[in-house]
Amino acid sequence: MFNRNKFTDEELRDFERYEEYERRKNERIVKGAGNFIYRFFVYCFIWITGYLLTMTILVGAFKMGEVLSAIIGMILPVIVIRKVEYIKENPFKSLVLTAFLLFISMIAFDVR
């Protein structure tokens, strides 16, 4: 009477499988984007704390000039992040450890 489309069971199963495939694909995209953003921010904070830690140690312990220690402080954390496997495996723990070391070095060298 109303000209309904009649689908076979196989066509309905194919359609359901396709919908499930699309849903899982979208979930993987969102999960990947979230992981990327998380790692980006954590690595940025690791770089910043590593930069400050390196600069604090070079200025406080070795009495190096601030400009030279800033340049070394910007380059050294990048090398460390790329070479040390622990940072790649446990980025958040590495951030906490680096921040703790920064705190200790600021107390030790009386940075104000």
Image: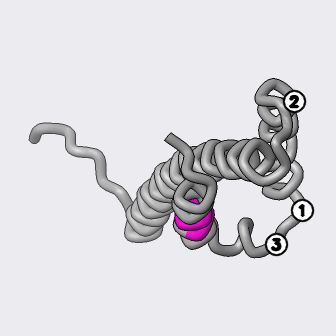
In 3D space, how far apart are the residues under numbered discs 3 and 2 (Cα atoms)?
28 Å
Residue placed farthest to the top in the image?
A: 67
Secondary element type, mark 3:
helix
Mark 2 lies on residue: 68
Residue 32 in the image: x percent, y percent? 57, 54
* Residue numbers of the magenta segment: 97-101
Query: Can residue 66 be seen?
Result: yes
Secondary element type, mark 2:
helix
Residue placed farthest to the left in the image?
A: 1
Amino acid residing under circle 2 = Leu
Which mark, by number, is residue 83? 1
Report crowding for label 1: few under 14, some 14 to 19, many 20 or more residues within 10 A (C-alpha): few
Is 14 rendered above or below residue 67?
below
Residue 61 in the image: x percent, y percent? 78, 53
Give the mark count. Answer: 3
Q: Looking at the rendering, which quadrant does residue 2 occupy?
A: top left
Q: Residue shown at 70%/74% (left/top)?
A: 89
Q: Residue shown at 62%/54% (left/top)?
A: 109
Which mark, by number, is residue 85? 3
Which mark, by number, is residue 70? none
Query: Can residue 32 be seen?
Result: no
Q: What secondary structure is the magenta-colored segment mainly? A: helix
Say if mark 1 contacts mark 2, CB within 8 Å: no
Report crowding for label 3: few under 14, some 14 to 19, many 20 or more residues within 10 A (C-alpha): few
Front one among 112 and 2: 112
Quadrant assignment for the N terminus = top left
Is 45 rendered above or below residue 27?
above
Is 98 rendered above or below residue 60?
below
